[in-house]
Each structure stands twice: as structure tokens, then as C-alpha cells.
């Protein structure tokens, strides 16, 4: 079984395509279960954000799994596979581990080092756990990726090298509007990204913050948290009429802000939704500036957030990722040989017990003390004979060709292949049950 990643991101696909492929809510759950039902897949997790849709799976057949997962992404998005495949990337085994660690560390984000991705990966992990599509392999891999992400932010300047999407957007807003502290800000939506937006506005000194959301209670809670006020969703047009700065990030599948709702005056709109919330036609309105994910992607909204330490931060994080990938793969390879070592020791123990039973039947006159001494002696001899090769094979197993040593043990000692598999299954059940 090996880890496979099939997906697309802002690096390989235009925003318009990402909009079509992006899945949330029930659609995300359905995709997750459809992936896990693929005959070549044993475990599954889906990361779906405004910048990427990636399927992580533990598979036993590479080509079959790649074809199956690609087709599922096409079916769920409604994009023909011949159009989608040109934008898909595939990472397998070592490269899959490196990719996930890089994503968690912020190296693959649209805005370098943004911390939002950590929460998104954590949410994907939690959903897979809740839906029962996760096993020991993916669980441990993703948990380690989250640790790598935290370490990268704690030990390097990656946070300073690149701000969040919201931070970049506010930098651009300041260029258009001047100091934003005295401006009226409108936040449309009340999810995680909207909450981050509202909090960032508050930290930037904005005191007049209005929150609009379809579920008014959630708008009220977010508004109270940042010292703002909430408005009913039906009042959106009226609030747009008085707002200077608008940040929209809802989960809607249709446009939330249309051109006829936006006044033709100096105004800055930041659309962080996927699919988009704001009609691109508002760009044609006099005085109105619209920045969305597409303009951030193509570089037309470059906020020049580099503080001079960007290159050093990237190098430092890449070193951390390389170190963590090597450590993970080494430990993972070593763990693969453990079931074979357990099977070998189990077989040796069975041989010892059988020979001891035969000895007792041939020498019934042995007293209990003598019998115990013989038993202990034979067991010590077997343990000493097995100690060196089992320790050595665990060390050798950490090399890239480590699996061959486990295979050699199974061949040399004629081990039943079902026994290591049974040991591995028991380990998986124990891990998942924690």
C-alpha cells in the first residue's frame, strides 16, 4: 500500500476551473466516500480550498487508482476528463509525502507561508476521521504534516515573508483607499475565512465593521466578536451603498454581489470566495476596484509583501520539509519490516514450544527444576540467535530498498505471508481505534 495524491491547484489550473472543481458540504462528503469505494483505494482524504482540490489516498495499484480518482474528479465537477487531465498533477509515495509537507508548511500557497492552510488540512483530516475513510497510514502522515507546518511557522520567518490572502487584500485596499482605519468595512459571510477577515480588519484599526450573512445569528456572533454590528442578508444592497471596503467569502454557488448592487464611486471589493461571490462586471463601474482570487493568481494584484527575508525563509522551510520527509520515510520503512520480524519470532517461539514438548515426552523423568532450566536455556539461545539479524534488518529497512530485506527474511525462513499481514492489520486496527 502506498500514498497517492491526485489534484489541481492555483499553480496548474485557472480560477474558473478551480471554481467548477471545488467541493464543499455534502458534495465533499460524497466525493470522499466515492473515492474510498474505489477498489484500488484503502484510505481517503480530500483537501478542498479556494486554491486547491486534492485527493489523498492509500492505494495498492498505481495506474488503476490514478485513473479512478481522475475520473471521479471529472464526474463530481462536471468537467470532461480530457479537459481536466491537463491541469491535474500526480504525486506518489515519497513525492506524495513531500508534497503534503510542503502544502502544510505554506510553500505551495498562493500567498507564501499563509497559515490558513494548516486549518484547512486539519479540517480535511477531521472530516475523513468522522466519515470513517481514514486508516493508520493517512492518519499518521497528515498528523505529521500538521506538525511540520507548525514547526515551519515557529522556526522560520515564513509568516513574515508572506501574509495571508486577507492581509494581501488589505494592503491593496490601502493603496486604493488610503488609511483604512476610518473607513466602513462590510464582511459578507460568517465562516472561517470571513472570521479571519473581520479579525484582520479589527487589528488594522477599522472600527466600523458590518457583517452580513444568510444565517443572521452567525452574523451577530461574528460582529460581536469584533465590536461591529450585524445586518440582515436582505439589507446587503443598502450596506453596499455605504461601505468603502467589502470582503466577501461565502459558500454560495451563485453570485452574491451583482453589478447592479454596487454604487459607482470609490470602493474596494475583495472577493475570496470559490466559486466567486462578486460579479466581475463591477470592475467596469467608475471608481470601483475589485480584487479576486483570479487577479491574485495572475499577478495583477501583486502586493509586494516581501520583507527582504523571503528567500531565506523559503530555504529554511525547504530544509525543514526535507528533514521531516527523510525522517518520516525512514520510520515508515522501518515499520514495514516489523510485522515480518514479529512473524519470525512467533515462528521461532512455536518451534521452541514444539521441541520442548517433544523433549518432555521423551524424558518424563525430568523434574520441574531441570525442565525449567532447559526451557530457559533454549529460549535464550533462540533469542540471541535472532537478536542480531532482527536488529540489523530493522536498520537496513530504513533505506530506500528496505522492503527487500523483509522479503528476504520471509523467503529464508519460509514465513507464511498471511502472518505479517495479520500483524499489520492488528496494528492498523489498534491505531485507528485510538
Image: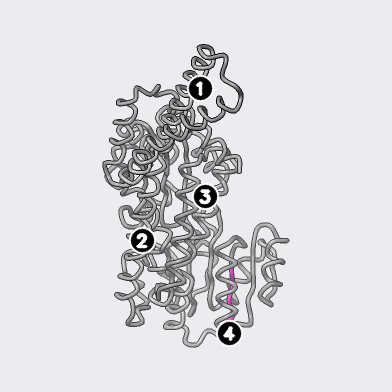
Q: What element does badge 3 sit on?
A: helix
Residue position for label 4: 205
Q: Nearer the viewer, residue 58 or 165?
A: 58
Location of residue 407 (image quadrant):
top left
Q: Magenta residues: mostly which secondary structure?
A: strand
The magenta region covers: 183-187
User: How busy is the neighbourhood of tag 3: few (under 14 within 10 Å), some, or many (20 plus)?
Assistant: many
Disc 2 or 4, which lies upstream in sequence? 4
Expressed as whole percent of the image width and height from the top left, the position of residue 384 reads: 40, 38
Q: Nearer the viewer, residue 307 or 49?
A: 307
Q: Is residue 399 left or right of residue 153?
A: left
**Mark 3 near mark 4, Cβ–Cβ under 8 Å?**
no
Q: Is residue 199 left or right of residue 332?
A: right
Query: Residues under labels 1 and 3: Cα distance?
Result: 49 Å
Disc 3 or 2, which lies upstream in sequence? 3
Q: Is residue 345 above or below residue 191?
A: above
Residue position for label 3: 124
In magenta stretch: residue 256: no
Residue position for label 1: 353
Q: Residue at x 40, y 32 (%)?
A: 340
Residue position for label 2: 321
**Mark 1 near mark 4, Cβ–Cβ under 8 Å?**
no
Q: Residue at x 55, y 82 (%)?
A: 204
User: How busy is the neighbourhood of tag 1: few (under 14 within 10 Å), some, or many (20 plus)?
Assistant: some
Q: Nearer the viewer, residue 375 or 107?
A: 375
Q: Quadrant of the N terminus?
A: top left
Disc 1 or 2, which lies upstream in sequence? 2
Expressed as whole percent of the image width and height from the top left, the position of residue 116 reads: 49, 64
Q: Quadrant of the C terminus?
A: top right
Amino acid at each position: 500500500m502506498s500514498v497517492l495524491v491526485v489534484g489541481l491547484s492555483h499553480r496548474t489550473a485557472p480560477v474558473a476551473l478551480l471554481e467548477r472543481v471545488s467541493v464543499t458540504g455534502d458534495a465533499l462528503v460524497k466525493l470522499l466516500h466515492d473515492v474510498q469505494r474505489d477498489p484500488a483505494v484503502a484510505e481517503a482524504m480530500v483537501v478542498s480550498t479556494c486554491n486547491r482540490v486534492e485527493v489523498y489516498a492509500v492505494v495498492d495499484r498505481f495506474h488503476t487508482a490514478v485513473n479512478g480518482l481522475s475520473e471521479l474528479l471529472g464526474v463530481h465537477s462536471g468537467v470532461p476528463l480530457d479537459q481536466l487531465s491537463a491541469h491535474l498533477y500526480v504525486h506518489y509515495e515519497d513525492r506524495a509525502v513531500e508534497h503534503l509537507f510542503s502544502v502544510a508548511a505554506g510553500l505551495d500557497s498562493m500567498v507564501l507561508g499563509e497559515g490558513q492552510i494548516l486549518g484547512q488540512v486539519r479540517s480535511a483530516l477531521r472530516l475523513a476521521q468522522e466519515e470513517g475513510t481514514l486508516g493508520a497510514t493517512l492518519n499518521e502522515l497528515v498528523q505529521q504534516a500538521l506538525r511540520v507546518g507548525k514547526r515551519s511557522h515557529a522556526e522560520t520567518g515564513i509568516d513574515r515573508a508572506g501574509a495571508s490572502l486577507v492581509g494581501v487584500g488589505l494592503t491593496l485596499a490601502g493603496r486604493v483607499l488610503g488609511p483604512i482605519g476610518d473607513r466602513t468595512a462590510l464582511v459578507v459571510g460568517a465562516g472561517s475565512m470571513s472570521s479571519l477577515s473581520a479579525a484582520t480588519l479589527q487589528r488594522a484599526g477599522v472600527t466600523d465593521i458590518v457583517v452580513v450573512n444568510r444565517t443572521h445569528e452567525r452574523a451577530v456572533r461574528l460582529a460581536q466578536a469584533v465590536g461591529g454590528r450585524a445586518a440582515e442578508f436582505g439589507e446587503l444592497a443598502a450596506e453596499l451603498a455605504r461601505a468603502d471596503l467589502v470582503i466577501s467569502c461565502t459558500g454560495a454557488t451563485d453570485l452574491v454581489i451583482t453589478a447592479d448592487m454596487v454604487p459607482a464611486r470609490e470602493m474596494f471589493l475583495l472577493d475570496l470566495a470559490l466559486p466567486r461571490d462578486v460579479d466581475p462586471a463591477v470592475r467596469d463601474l467608475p471608481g470601483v476596484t475589485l480584487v479576486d482570487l483570479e487577479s491574485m493568481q495572475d499577478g495583477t494584484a501583486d502586493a509586494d509583501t516581501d520583507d527582504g527575508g523571503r528567500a531565506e525563509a523559503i530555504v529554511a522551510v525547504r530544509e525543514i520539509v526535507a528533514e521531516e520527509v527523510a525522517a518520516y520515510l525512514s520510520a515508515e520503512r522501518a515499520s514495514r519490516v516489523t510485522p515480518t520480524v514479529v512473524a519470525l519470532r512467533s515462528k521461532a517461539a512455536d518451534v521452541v514450544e514444539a521441541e520442548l514438548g517433544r523433549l518432555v515426552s521423551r524424558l518424563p523423568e525430568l523434574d520441574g527444576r531441570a525442565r525449567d532450566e532447559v526451557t530457559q536455556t533454549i529460549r535464550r539461545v533462540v533469542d540471541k540467535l535472532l537478536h542480531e539479524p532482527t536488529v540489523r534488518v530493522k536498520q537496513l529497512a530504513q533505506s530506500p530498498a528496505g522492503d527487500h530485506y523483509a522479503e528476504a527474511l520471509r523467503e529464508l525462513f519460509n514465513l507464511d505471508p498471511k502472518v505479517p499481514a495479520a500483524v499489520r492489520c492488528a496494528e492498523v486496527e489498534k491505531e485507528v481505534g485510538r
